[in-house]
Image (tube, grey):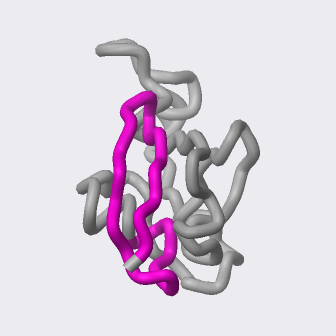
Amino acid sequence: MLSTQLTVNGKSHTLKADTRTKLFNVLREHLQLTGSKKGCDHGQCGACTVLVEGRRINACLTLVAMHDSQAVTTIEGLARGDVLHQLQASFLQHDGFQCG
């Protein structure tokens, strides 16, 4: 088991995970952040997209161990309190799908 520190949506987390654990699985299963979805599991659909240190990545293709001490922003972290981020509001307004 590997101890990894992540800052997710502004909150610090210290996690213990197998070195083969994907960032996607940590977000959904350990932190219950279910906004990122598993679509194709090959990095083609974009449903698992998150920001790591401000850069867009596919969480299904990267290991959590590769992001120790880094900042991760999920779709849940884009809102400011009750005010939706423009991206979130657009998905709602246009009945958008994350993958499809």
Estimate the x, y position of residue 97 in percent, counting from the top left. 49, 57
Which residue is at the front of the view, 93 or 6?
Answer: 6
Q: Is residue 83 visible?
A: yes
Task: Please say whether residue 9 is one of the residues in the magenta stretch.
Answer: yes
Quadrant containing the C terminus in the rendered view: bottom right
Estimate the x, y position of residue 40 in percent, counting from the top left. 56, 83
Which residue is at the front of the view, 81 or 31?
Answer: 31
Q: Which residues are magenta?
A: 2-25
Task: Please say whether residue 14 is one of the residues in the magenta stretch.
Answer: yes
Estimate the x, y position of residue 46 in percent, counting from the top left. 63, 65
In the visual, does 58 lie left or right of 9?
right
Which residue is at the front of the view, 95 or 76?
Answer: 76
Is 47 situated above or below 92?
Answer: below
Quadrant containing the N terminus in the rendered view: bottom left
Is 99 situated above or below 21?
Answer: above
Q: Is residue 100 visible?
A: no
In the visual, does 70 lie left or right of 1?
right
Is 55 situated above or below 92?
Answer: below
Residue drawn at x 64%, y 66% as measured from the top left: 66
* Count of numbered labels shown in the rendering: 0
Q: Quadrant of residue 83?
A: top left
Residue drawn at x 60%, y 45% as measured from the top left: 70
Which residue is at the front of the view, 37 or 98?
Answer: 37
Residue drawn at x 46%, y 80% as measured from the top left: 21
Is 72 situated above or below 99?
Answer: above
